[in-house]
Image: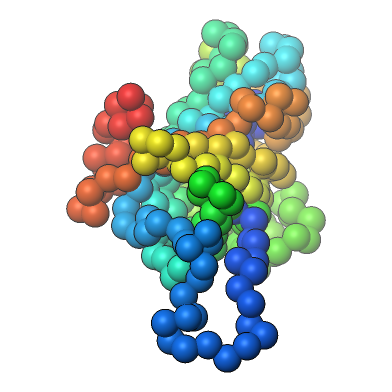
């Protein structure tokens, strides 16, 4: 999640750091140095499957306004030190659905296979009897090198920061369209996402996603007319959300992709 897509939407995967408020004003014995019971958090170390949904609005040529959902199933490997989390996030499957039958957007498997694994920080916080998950804003780059940082995205396929990430012989990464608009888009993207969620009584996490994507179309083929700008987040923030369910540590990305929604029934 890393994350996407002119006509289609940006997919992508986040927690805000909060202080646990431990008092360091007095020397403490090793027994006393444990956090107060009111601040203790459960262990969530191990492997989790995550469903990551970002809903967007775009205005492609010919068709008009389109509402799209980019649905990503991801494998999360979590290491934990008290409330601090280190999260390794690997996209396993990405699909795009929209309210328009005139055009279908496809994220090729080759693109998903080359998204790689992102490492990011997170935090668990207890407030009274509730456990909250925060994953702060994290930049993700597709088809363009992360060394670019927050600088303006290049518009030329020959720019030194642009590379063929999905290794299909075209600059950037490839997105396919079929229908009234058909062909391929070779794009670069920079996106970020920020997750805030809560531990549910069934042991799963659920919450909402804030996100944004910048996109440049380097080239396009077929019957694709006009400019294809990056989609914008849906104004109803509840339309972008995530769920997480604990799975066996031996679970592979392929298994998460194959089971998909069944993991969250």
Closer to the camera in the image, 17 or 227: 17
At x 52%, y 67%, the residue is 36
Question: Image check: 124 left or right of 61?
Answer: left
| Vertical arrangement, residue 53 with respect to residue 248, above or below | above
At x 60%, y 17%, the residue is 181
At x 58%, y 91%, the residue is 27
- The location of residue 257, given as percent across then percent down, is 32, 36
Question: Image check: 145 left or right of 201?
Answer: right
Residue 30 location, quadrant: bottom left
Residue 89: in sight, yes or no? yes
Closer to the camera in the image, 230 or 118: 118
Looking at the rendered structure, the number of numbered marks drawn on it comes to: 0
Q: Residue furthest bottom?
A: 27
- The location of residue 144, given as percent across then percent down, is 61, 56
At x 27%, y 33%, the residue is 258
Q: How is the image coloured?
A: rainbow
Q: Residue furthest top?
A: 101
Residue 119: in sight, yes or no? no
| Vertical arrangement, residue 165 with respect to residue 56, above or below | below
Q: Residue furthest left?
A: 250
| Vertical arrangement, residue 99 with respect to residue 145, above or below | above
Q: Residue furthest right?
A: 152
Residue 244 location, quadrant: top left
Q: Quadrant of the C terminus?
A: top left
- The location of residue 51, given as percent across then percent down, is 44, 36
Closer to the camera in the image, 232 or 237: 237
- The location of residue 255, given as percent across then percent down, is 24, 40
């Amino acid at each position: 999640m890393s994350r996407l897509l002119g006509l289609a939407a940006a997919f992508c995967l986040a927690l805000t750091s909060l202080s646990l408020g431990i008092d360091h004003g007095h020397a403490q014995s090793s027994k006393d140095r444990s956090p107060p019971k009111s601040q203790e958090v459960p262990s969530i170390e191990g492997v989790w499957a995550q469903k990551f949904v970002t809903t967007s609005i775009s205005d492609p040529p010919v068709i008009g306004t389109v509402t799209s959902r980019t649905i990503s199933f991801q494998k999360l490997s979590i290491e934990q030190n008290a409330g601090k989390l280190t999260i390794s996030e690997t996209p396993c499957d990405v699909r795009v659905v929209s309210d328009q039958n005139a055009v279908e957007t496809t994220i090729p498997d080759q693109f998903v296979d080359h998204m790689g694994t992102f490492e990011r920080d997170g935090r668990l916080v207890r407030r009274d009897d509730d456990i909250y998950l925060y994953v702060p804003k994290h930049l993700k780059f597709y088809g363009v090198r992360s060394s670019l940082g927050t600088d303006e995205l290049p518009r030329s396929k020959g720019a030194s920061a642009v590379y063929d990430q999905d290794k299909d012989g075209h600059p950037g990464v490839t997105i396919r369209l079929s229908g009234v608009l058909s062909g391929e888009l070779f794009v670069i993207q920079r996106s970020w996402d920020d997750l805030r969620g809560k531990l549910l009584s069934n042991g799963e996490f659920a919450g909402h996603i804030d996100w944004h994507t910048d996109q440049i179309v380097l080239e396009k083929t077929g019957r694709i007319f006009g400019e294809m700008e990056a989609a914008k987040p849906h104004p109803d923030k509840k339309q972008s959300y995530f769920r997480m369910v604990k799975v066996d540590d031996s679970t592979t990305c392929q298994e998460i992709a194959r089971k998909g929604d069944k993991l969250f029934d």
